[in-house]
Amino acid sequence: MRLTLGPLQYFWPRRQVLDFYAESLDWPLDVVYLGETVCSKRRELNLRDWVGLAEQQTKAGREVVLSSLALIEAESELGALRRLAGLGNVRIEANDISAVQVCRRHGVPFVGGPSLNVYNLETLRLLQDDGLYRLVLNVEMGCELVAELRQAAAAAGCDLPELELIAWGRLPLSYSARCFTARALDLAKDQCGFRCIEYPDGLPLSTREGRHFLTINGVQMQGAENCDLLPEWTELAAAGIVLLRLYPQQHGTAQAVRRFDAVRGGAAVPPREPGCTAGYWSGLPGMQPPP
Amino acid sequence: MLLVCPAGNLPGLIAAVDAGADAVYLGFRDQTNARAFAGLNFGDADLRAGVAYAQARGRKVYVALNTYPGPSRVAQWQGAVDRAAEFGADAIIAADAGLLAYAARTHPRLDRHLSVQGSATTQAALSWYHEHFGISRAVLPRVLSVQQVERICEQSPVPLEVFAFGSLCIMVEGRCQLSSYVTGQSPNRHGVCSPASFVRWEDHADGSRTVRLNSVLLDVYASGEAAGYPTVCKGRFVVGGETFHALEEPTSLNTLSLLPRLRSAGVAALKIEGRQRSSAYIRTVTRVWREAIDRLRQDTDRWRELPEWNAALSAHAEGHQTTLGPYHRSWH
């Protein structure tokens, strides 16, 4: 099992981002995804900064993948991706079909990100023909669908790509053209003042009876709680998952990576972190507390 | 510019055709389409009658097959494509790449439209679907501003269809798991958002009402306050100590004022949302848009939106409110 650090979903100040990734050089990670996936206006780091971080991580022995936006609203937003793809010798996480097309055109191998809608083998094989070498399962893909996917592949006599599952952190649930952080602050999106930088852990949204329900992160909505699938470690391995994704969170990321690595090293599987969900893995709705 | 109208059943299809729809879109009675509601959609006899009724009048019928089959349900979805072809539909509207590939391979003469659920917002994405599956039209997600629609019309390899009127998804279509997060059932996989079986209304002694989806409180309505269908995105929540529609108000999209601009941009078709709505809704909304499009064609320079059109549309809008939605930059 390989451990991956998913792309940073929040907007953190430049210094915090650089420090976070510097610190991560000591963590037992195999793959690191870098780049902005949520909002094209977030530019604390420029392309050169990300490439610099990529070089550091590569030197530390990690596979580096550059992640692209989940919602691309204009051709101009593809410009940076095209430039990267043109450089050659990069791997890209395509989170939108636009990015798939760019990778296909440039012959760049890509990871299918969790916001691509891949629910069956037929779709997956088309993407493999275009250069997909790994699929990050979308949040809805639980154990039953993964088993079906494997059966379908076996029946068709074809190999699945590497399967990666979101195993720790807040689940990305939806994307919009509207910025909900700006809306909550009564600002127009075009004059947002980049205020989401004030919410490094997202902006909590609660029901009217005070239950923390969702997390606002600019144009993205996330669940309230972290998901933690470490207790399912054995089951995940048996299901053919070969990479587990941990998303950077404001708190607890280093500790989470070490917990997962300890189990990889043979330690007993610990109970779920308090307050965490088991996501969709067991077939329950994503927010349900596990039984 | 074609007018594409919804039909949830045969009377709805007849209403749409009689009121001037150029094409009607509909779904089968299962989860192969994104309005998989009890009592809605078309069985074989109704589909046969509907296709005959529309085509005898020179109109077209599109079958929406716009959900995503899991691995064990692919055969069922492929069967639905076969049925659409067998019944003589003019096109299917699909989102799943595997299903589009099957349709292109098996029924090459059946037109393939990319559904809004396919989330194609750029020329690059449209080209991907076009090059792989030979789609002849694409429906744009309701996230783009009118300027962005104009730009993409210039660059698109295929004719484009945009939403003109009806309920509004605030999230990018095909990229929203809020319903499944709460209920386990999603628009993508099950063709439903906030399924009715998970909705629980409660009346209280003071006349107020609460509505929950599964166990989650979506809203509290004061006595006499109008309440729409409870989806997560249209609930009232608390953010930063304030209670408000944190994601979106219950309101409908109405682009009537943009009609000349959409036509100049080269938009090929306008779509009316609402297969789940009544025949009265379909008849009224279709008639208004038919008249507006015809008048624009006859006299572009003197065209203006008539107050009676908007009055008729508002009466059928969610919460009786309409918005230009994402087409208007300030909405974002």
Image: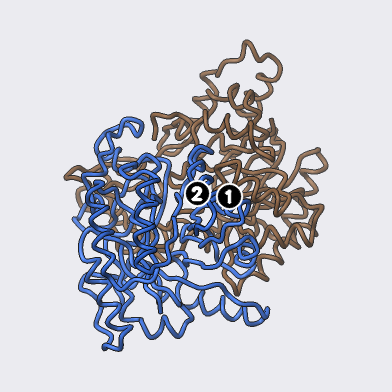
Q: Quadrant of the N terminus of chain A?
A: bottom left
Which amino acid type is marked by label 2?
A: Leu
Q: Quadrant of the C terminus of chain A?
A: bottom left
Q: Colour of chain B?
A: brown
In the image as oriented, which residue stretches furthest toward the front? A59
Residue tagged by mark 1? Answer: A102
Q: What residue is shown at x 26% (from left), y 40% (from top)?
A: A184
First reached walking from the N terminus: tag 2 or tag 1 = 2
Up-down relation of residue B162 to residue B67 (above or below): above
Residue B120 coordinates in the image, percent (x, y): 57, 46
Residue tagged by mark 2? Answer: A84
The local secondary structure at tag 2 comes to helix
Tell me where residue B72 sits by quadrant. bottom right
- Any part of residue B182 in sight: no
Front in this rendered view, residue B241 or B123: B123
In front: mark 2 or mark 1? Answer: 2
The chain identifier of the residue carrying mark 1 reads A
Which amino acid type is marked by label 1?
A: Val
Q: What residue is shown at x 65% (from left), y 64% (from top)?
A: A129
Up-down relation of residue B143 to residue B46 (above or below): above
Tell me where residue B292 sits by quadrant. top right
